Image (cartoon, rainbow, N blue to C red):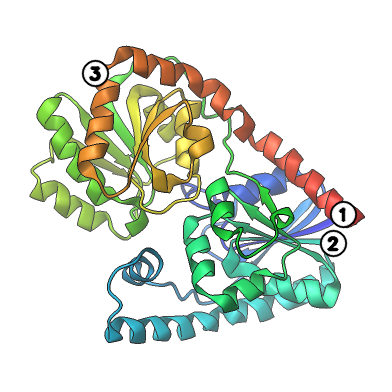
Amino acid sequence: MKICRIAKHLPRVGVTPVEGLHPYFLTALIEEDTLVLTKKYPAQPRPLPSHAQVVEISYKDIPFSDYMENETFVGGKKSIIHKIKFIYRTVSKFREVSFLFKCMPALLRYRPDIVHCHAFITILPGIFSKIFLRSKLIVTLHSSVDAVMLKKSRFLRSLLNFADKIFCVSTEIKRELLPFYSENRFEITPNGVDLSLFRNQSEPRENRLIAVGTFRWYKGYKYLVRAMKIIVEKYPDYTLIICGGGLERQQVEDEIRRLSLEQHISITGMITQEKIAELLNRSRIFVMSSVVEGLPKALIEALACGTPAVITTACAAEDAAENTALVVEPKNPAAFADAVSRLISDPQLYKRLADACPDAVKKYDWRNIADSVKQIYSSLLSQ
């Protein structure tokens, strides 16, 4: 079996892995001849076992702005100016087709049996390989943003029709797309967790909430800050720590100052996974205020550390959160603050959720996920 994994991101040496863990762990744990095609960044990719080779490709990334993503994928105003901006951004985005042409030589030399595209944006090289090399094509959808984008565009849905299998990290993403594709095309392959690092160390818990994630519009941090304003009025000894960096950190810091919460909310910036595991073990409640997600790995890591959670329905984490978290509607600071208060004030509820965490995360062990994915690969090749 020869596997080609196409992923825009891989974890990098000396850089906190925010993205790319999914293709990294599948490559490391599925011990088959594997070629990884990825974007070239200044830092070197984290080393992989000898059965894998990595080819880095330089090309210009044309990202949507946070404003464009928010307005297009979640909703909001649709003025003429917005539509013109959207068309311009979309046309500019197609300049990334250079990635496809730069992938072609490696694909033609390698001639993979399986091409696995980690994110819809990398599908064009996969379609090329399916048509000209007769490879089986798999596409993983990591976010509910992918589902919204596909629902809105018949053209994008036609591209996904080339996939032999559509992997979704959550059942919510699958549910959104079921009207357009047959159910047997879908497989649920969730984000995983490194249980050797993220585990309950039975440390004393401080009166602290913890959030982990990049500062992007879909994380909903402004709603979390506003919820914290309500929480500290009732529990002034509680603090919030946010682990992460990103484009919207300044806006969140401005909101913290506006609400005079500088003494209650701190931001670490980018830190190591080891440090995140330590903070999760010493914090009382994990919080996630996202307005769009796709089974966030940070939630699974928190549960693996025995830390109960308060999250939003937008996290698409109904399986993981069933007995381990309180779930509220997004963009509702008052409801979020009320759920946190319930966990703080009810020791029996807190203990019940904390005790359920170990069993809830067992199926998210990367080894189990890799074994399941390998079986799907073998099944496709035998058809």
Mark 2 element type: loop
The residue drawn where x is 47% and y is 29% is 303
On the rendered image, what quadrant is the C terminus found in? Answer: bottom right
The residue drawn where x is 85% and y is 71% is 134
Q: What's under tag 2, amino acid-wise?
A: Asp
Residue 289 numbered mark, or none = none
Which residue is identified by label 1?
1
> Is 151 situated left or right of 244 in this image?
right
> Is 123 situated left or right of 349 in this image?
right
Distance from the alpha carbon under mark 3 to that under mark 1: 54 Å
The answer to whether 13 is drawn above or below residue 91 in the figure is above
Crowding at label 2, few (<14), some or many (≥20) Cα neighbours within 10 Å?
Answer: many
Distance from the alpha carbon under mark 1 to that under mark 2: 6 Å
On the rendered image, what quadrant is the N terminus found in? Answer: bottom right
Q: Is residue 350 visible?
A: yes
1 and 2 marks in contact (CB < 8 Å): yes
Q: Position of residue 14 (x, y in %)?
A: 49, 48
Q: What's under tag 1, amino acid-wise?
A: Met
Q: Position of residue 35 (x, y in %)?
A: 75, 60
Which residue is identified by label 2?
113
Indicate which disc, 3 or 1, sits on the residue closer to the N terminus.
1
For the residues carrying marks 3 and 1, which lies nearer the camera in this image? 3
Indicate which disc, 1 or 2, sits on the residue closer to the N terminus.
1
Q: Position of residue 84 (x, y in %)?
A: 35, 87
Mark 1 element type: loop
Q: Is residue 48 visible?
A: no
Indicate which disc, 2 or 3, sits on the residue closer to the N terminus.
2
2 and 3 marks in contact (CB < 8 Å): no
> Is 93 situated left or right of 308 in this image?
right
The answer to whether 242 is drawn above or below residue 103 in the figure is above
